[in-house]
């Protein structure tokens, strides 16, 4: 009997040794995605230059091209000429002010004399009233001319605002890439006419990508924002490459399992979407599948 038991134990040991060890089943599956940005035109006109191609890697602040700005430059030149003509009126106004001040000074001298004569009974009240009226009239005239000057300055300031607006439109006519990334799609071409808000190209920062995966309701309590996870994805020769990531988003509502992830039987289950942020050395492409093992 003992011999029989030893034989069974030995057989089990051989079977366990000869069979390959099963790998741990991934906690979740998903596909890689990235934050894509569609760059649109901020000006109307013809694309005079547009230097980019799909798949090209661009740097933040890199010059891409520009929209025709000839009409804007013409308008800017016209406004500057108009402003110059407006400011030329200031010299004439200043001359009028100086003349009126000189007249006022003379009247003030005359006023002083009349008041002294009136004090010694050598002048009448009518003479005093007349000279006082002349002083008031001269002061009002100076004030009116100064108002004209301020009106001209306000008009010139309005011209400055219009010039600044045109300069801003010229700045927006220059296409500058806003982020580091790879061009995913090109929607416009050189010599085409574009308009404000019309898409020019789509770009994505591929240095950091996200794996959108799905976990069950039972798994959800153990998944937290900031949690570390081991992400595995296909490499050459059907091998898996692994990188470490961090959970950055968890859906607040459940959804049915996406068709592209699970079998038909499992698609009736409710799951929660999560996103795991992963640094990319260039090996990960958008749409690639990935497996998740959470690090407890």
Image (tube, helix red, strand yellow):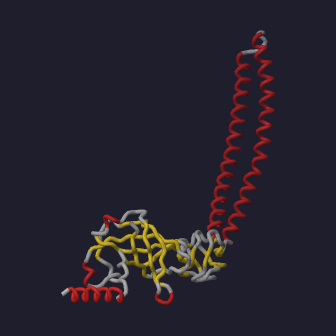
When the figure is inspected, residue 241 is found, relative to residue 98, above or below; the finding is below
Look at the image and tell me in which quarter the N terminus lies.
Answer: bottom left
Count of numbered badges drawn on the protein = 0
Residue 199: percent from the left, percent from the top? Answer: 53, 76
Residue that sits furthest to the front in the current view? 2
Is residue 120 found left or right of 163 in the rendered image?
Answer: right
Residue that sits furthest to the left in the current view? 1
When the figure is inspected, residue 95 is found, relative to residue 273, above or below; the finding is above
Dividing the picture into quarters, in which one does residue 116 lie? top right
Question: Could you say which is closer to the camera, residue 28 or residue 55?
Answer: 28
Residue 237: percent from the left, percent from the top? Answer: 49, 90
Residue 146: percent from the left, percent from the top? Answer: 70, 40
Is residue 265 found left or right of 230 in the rendered image?
Answer: left
When the figure is inspected, residue 163 is found, relative to residue 129, above or below; the finding is below
When the figure is inspected, residue 10 is found, relative to residue 63, above or below; the finding is below
**Which residue shows up at 23% across the image and 88% down it?**
3
Dividing the picture into quarters, in which one does residue 17 lie? bottom left
**Which residue shows up at 70% across the image and 26% down it?**
133
Dividing the picture into quarters, in which one does residue 124 lie? top right
Is residue 238 found left or right of 115 in the rendered image?
Answer: left
| Res. 264 in view | yes
| Res. 39 in view | no
Question: Could you say which is closer to the camera, residue 72 or residue 14?
Answer: 14
**Which residue shows up at 66% across the image and 48% down it?**
154
Residue 20: percent from the left, percent from the top? Answer: 37, 87
Look at the image and tell me in which quarter the C terminus lies.
Answer: bottom left
**Which residue shows up at 63% across the image and 63% down it?**
168
Question: Could you say which is closer to the camera, residue 65 or residue 15?
Answer: 15
């Amino acid at each position: 009997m003992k011999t029989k038991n030893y034989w069974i134990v030995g057989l089990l040991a051989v079977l366990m040794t000869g069979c390959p060890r099963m790998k741990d089943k991934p906690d979740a599956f998903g596909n890689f995605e990235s934050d894509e940005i569609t760059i649109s035109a901020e000006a109307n006109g013809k694309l005079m230059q547009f230097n980019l191609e799909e798949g090209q890697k661009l740097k933040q602040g890199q010059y891409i091209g520009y929209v025709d700005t000839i009409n804007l430059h013409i308008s800017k030149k016209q406004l500057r000429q108009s402003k110059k003509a407006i400011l030329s009126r200031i010299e004439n106004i200043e001359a009028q002010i100086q003349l009126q001040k000189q007249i006022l000074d003379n009247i003030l001298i005359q006023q002083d004399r009349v008041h002294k004569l009136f004090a010694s009974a050598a002048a009448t009240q009518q003479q005093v009233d007349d000279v006082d009226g002349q002083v008031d009239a001269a002061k009002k005239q100076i004030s009116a001319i100064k108002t004209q000057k301020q009106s001209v300055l306000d008009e010139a300031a309005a011209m400055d605002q219009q010039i600044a607006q045109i300069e801003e439109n010229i700045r927006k006519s220059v296409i500058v890439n806003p982020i580091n990334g790879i061009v995913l799609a090109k929607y416009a071409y050189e010599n085409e006419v574009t308009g404000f808000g019309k898409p020019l190209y789509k770009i994505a920062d591929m240095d950091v990508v996200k794996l959108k995966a799905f976990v069950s309701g039972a798994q959800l309590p153990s998944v937290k924002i900031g949690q570390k996870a081991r992400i595995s994805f296909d490499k050459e020769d059907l091998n898996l490459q692994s990188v470490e990531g961090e959970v950055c988003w968890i859906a607040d509502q459940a959804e049915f399992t996406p068709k592209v992830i699970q079998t038909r039987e499992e698609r009736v289950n409710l799951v929660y979407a999560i996103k795991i942020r992963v640094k990319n050395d260039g090996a990960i492409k958008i749409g690639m599948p990935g497996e998740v093992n959470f690090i407890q």
